[in-house]
Amino acid sequence: MKWLKSKTEQGLTKLLKHGSGDFRFDPKNIRHRLMASIEQTKPHPIKHFRLNRVFKFSASFAGFVLIVSATFAFASNQVPGDKLFALNKAGESVILSLPMPAEQRAQVRDYIVDQRFEALDAVNLAPGTKSLETIKESDESLMRAVQEISKNKQKLEAKGKTKQAAKLEVILDNLQKKAADREKIIQKLEDETEDEETKARIHQHLEQIKNSREKARLEIKRFQNPESESDQILF
Amino acid sequence: MGCNELHQNSINMIEEIDVQNLVRRAQDGEQEAFGLIYDNYAQPIYNFLMSKVRHREVCEDLVHTVFLKAWMNLKSYQPRPSAKFSTWLYQIANYTLIDHWRTKKPTVELDDVENLAAFAVDPAHYEEYSYLWQAIRQLPLNYQTVLDLRFKQDLSVEETAHIMRKTSVGIRVLQHRALKALKNKLVES
């Protein structure tokens, strides 16, 4: 049956092809009209033109974002003293400028301090010219972290949000413990440094780290004994 | 009868590669190149339109419209490996025809006055197949179009699908139905 069908179709298609031919047509007359119309009509600009521009702009923007992202990703591994460390710090500032809950902000601060302390550990293993820069960055990151976390913790306490405040206290406690470990490393680096000026500056940063750690300790103590007004630290 | 034999009826068709060269020149604004494109495709486009419109003056106007539209939109044309330039032209012709049916004013039908053979290059040939034209004319427009493109213009399924904005499978189904309907009409007559 299928064979029969196809045979019928074949016959019809043959018939259609045989039956086709040209109609009488005077192309010159229409050509003349057409060329006259063309003379007066400019072709439409390519419709994709705007799209192309949008596409090109999008591609450029995507490329720019990619380059910036890649640079920031690369810079995130840079440690104090490296050429792109400033970019790493700029990236951290951007993150910290974003609105986020106090606990999350404290975690970011904790992470930054961790990064600086890891760099300090690396310097300890291979002392070199980056020592002072690394110590300075460790000191500053710890100081800022303790200040901000303590301030936010006090705000939470004032609002009666003791659970959230307790979480910040845990982070503060970790920070002061980590700082205590690094004080030993910095003390060792200070002892090994022969240049007096550098030695003095390392010592200065060491004292500030001790001070920050002490502030963190007192803040925790104040939280555990809220009546002890004498121990309250105001930032 | 193959496609080459079919196109022998029309003006000698030039190779696709030469057509594409002409298109590029026309895209750069060379009007004479577009004139040569017109010379190459005017007759097949006229045949395609005439077999449906069956009114010489209307059909000539439509041919003019098709090529003017092609000129105006030529810069948006991008060659594709699977489709010839003529596919693009037939697509414009098909849409022009659909627009014409939508907005057409009452005209005296050619068949009411004269036989279609009167407008054929070889009237005897059209007389011979007049029963076929009568049967085709009674089919729905999309059936007429698919039969015309596939068998009279000898375009491939893919090209026909491109012109009619359907899938290849859709064209095969439409073609099958159109042939079936044509067979029934021929049996009836």
Image (cartoon, coloured by chain):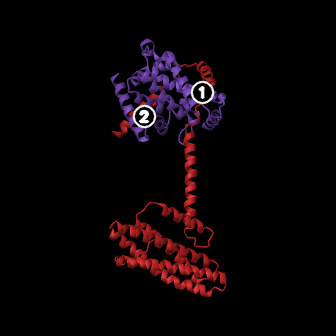
Chain colours: A red, B purple
Give, as a three-letter code, the residue at label 2.
Answer: Gln
Residue at 64% in and 24% down: A39
Q: Quadrant of residue B110?
A: top left
Q: CA distance from mark 2 to mark 1?
A: 33 Å
Where is mark 2, residue-wise? Answer: A10
Give, as a three-letter code, the residue at label 1.
Answer: Tyr
**Which image quarter is the C terminus of chain B in?**
top left
Q: Residues within 10 Å of mark 1 (few under 14, many from 20)?
A: many
**Residue B97: percent from left, percent from top:** 47, 26
Residue B42 visible at all = yes
**Residue A173: percent from left, percent from top:** 42, 78
Residue at 54% in and 81% down: A207
Under circle 1, the secondary element is: helix
**Residue B2: percent from left, percent from top:** 52, 34
Q: Chain of mark 1?
A: B
Where is mark 1, residue-wise? Answer: B38
